[in-house]
Image (spheres, rainbow, N blue to C red):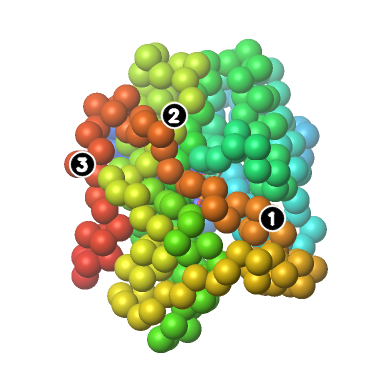
Amino acid sequence: MDVLVAGGSGFIGQALCRVLVDRGHEVTAASRTPDADGLPAAVETAVADVTDSNLEEVVDGHDAVVNLVALPSHVQPRGQSHEAVHFEGTRHLVAAAERTGVERFVQLSGLGVESGVDTAYFRAKRRAERVVRDADLEWVIYRPSVVFGDGCAFIPFVERLSPPLVTLLPGGERTWLQPIWVDDLAPMLADGLEDDRHVGQCYEIGGPERLTLAETVSRIRGGGAVVSIPMGLAAIAAILVDPIPWVPFGRDQYRVLGLDNTTADNDATEFGVSSKSLRTLSAYLADEHR
Ligand SMILES: NC(=O)c1ccc[n+]([C@@H]2O[C@H](COP(=O)([O-])OP(=O)(O)OC[C@H]3O[C@@H](n4cnc5c(N)ncnc54)[C@H](OP(=O)(O)O)[C@@H]3O)[C@@H](O)[C@H]2O)c1
């Protein structure tokens, strides 16, 4: 199969490209500045900006498209919006796929998009899912919990934010996560491309354990106290720092506090994987070769 991985040079993209090449597929990784470092030598790269409405040239000739294009969920970099990248970008990729005879389209969404919580990220991801579901394509949608592994943004983000001894966390004990290892997730994405059983399905995928945000931070930091900030105080802080673009906390982040980033039933089982066989965050962090 000839697969275009949009966002293929990103964190999940690199892991997926490795699996696809190992399974004998032809792979092109497309993004604005695709970097071949970190990709298998067999992967071709292509320049594409999904905010551009004309993506036919890049998409043409592929049997399948995987959409892994992302902006960080916690911040909108200057000049870019979740609406333009996640929603319009998906619309442009889907339209190009329909016009060029692509058969299958795999979309990465996120847990909580249908929760009713209204943030710019969730709104754009929700609308993007609708575009994919309405497309004249064989589609598969994945909603993973937070993904960890080599090259992830999540672990360095926590390490950077937290001071050495005490970490102050809004919603630390209220927010639940179900972190999944990228190398457990990537084969499930590849299965979605290969196996017709997955067409028309939306999968909620998490790792083997549910952790509070405080527990997650404590594991990453290897100890130290984690103190939850009362929600009232967090609400005031969110209003005060919301206008500051580089602060990764604001009204939208306040809105997702208390929203569980966990699955009701872990759909990892739909890929013949038992939840217990998945790698835990602790096992990953303890691995000195990572
Ligand atoms: N990581 C997680 O914990 C997590 C959890 C749930 C869902 N997801 C979803 O999984 C997907 C992949 O996430 P990720 O963590 O792998 O993201 P990532 O590491 O930030 O990679 C994003 C990719 O998108 C490309 N990109 C950004 N803007 C673009 C644009 N305008 N046009 C074309 N390419 C663009 C980037 O390359 P350039 O900069 O070269 O353009 C990069 O290759 C996203 O849909 C994300 O929402 C991730």
Q: Secondary structure at mark 3?
A: helix
Disc 2 beta carbon < 8 A from ligand 1? no
x and y percent of residue 129 in the render? 62, 29
Q: Would residue 166 be found to the left or right of residue 233 on screen?
A: left
Q: Position of residue 72 (x, y in %)?
A: 60, 56
The reply to whether residue 266 is visible in this rendering is: yes
Q: Amino acid at mark 1?
A: Asp
| 96, above or below 233, in the image | above
N-term-proximal mark, 3 vs 1: 1
Q: Can you tell me whether the CB of the residue at mark 1 lies under 8 Å from the nearest atom of ligand 1?
A: no
Which corner quadrant of the image does residue 68 belong to? top right
Q: Give the residue at mark 1.
A: 252
Label 1 Cα neighbours within 10 Å, binned few <14 / some 14-19 / many ≥20: many
Going from N to C along the chain, the mark reached first, 1 or 2, is 2
Q: Position of residue 259 (x, y in %)?
A: 54, 48
| Label 1 – label 2 distance at C-alpha | 25 Å
Give coordinates of residue 240: x percent, y percent: 76, 72
Q: CA distance from mark 3 to mark 1?
A: 33 Å
Question: Who's the residue at 19% across and 41% down the image?
Answer: 277
> Which labelled disc corresponds to residue 276?
3
Q: Quadrant of the N terminus?
A: top left
Give the residue type at disc 2. Answer: Tyr
The residue lying at 60 percent from left, 52 percent from top is 256
Q: State the residue position of label 2.
A: 203
Describe the element under mark 2 as helix, strand or loop: strand
Numbered circle sitting on residue 31: none
Give the camera-side residue of 47 and 269.
Answer: 269
Mark 2 vs 3, N-terminal side: 2
Assess disc 2: are there few (<14), some (14-19) or many (≥20) residues with their C-alpha within 10 Å of its C-alpha.
Answer: many
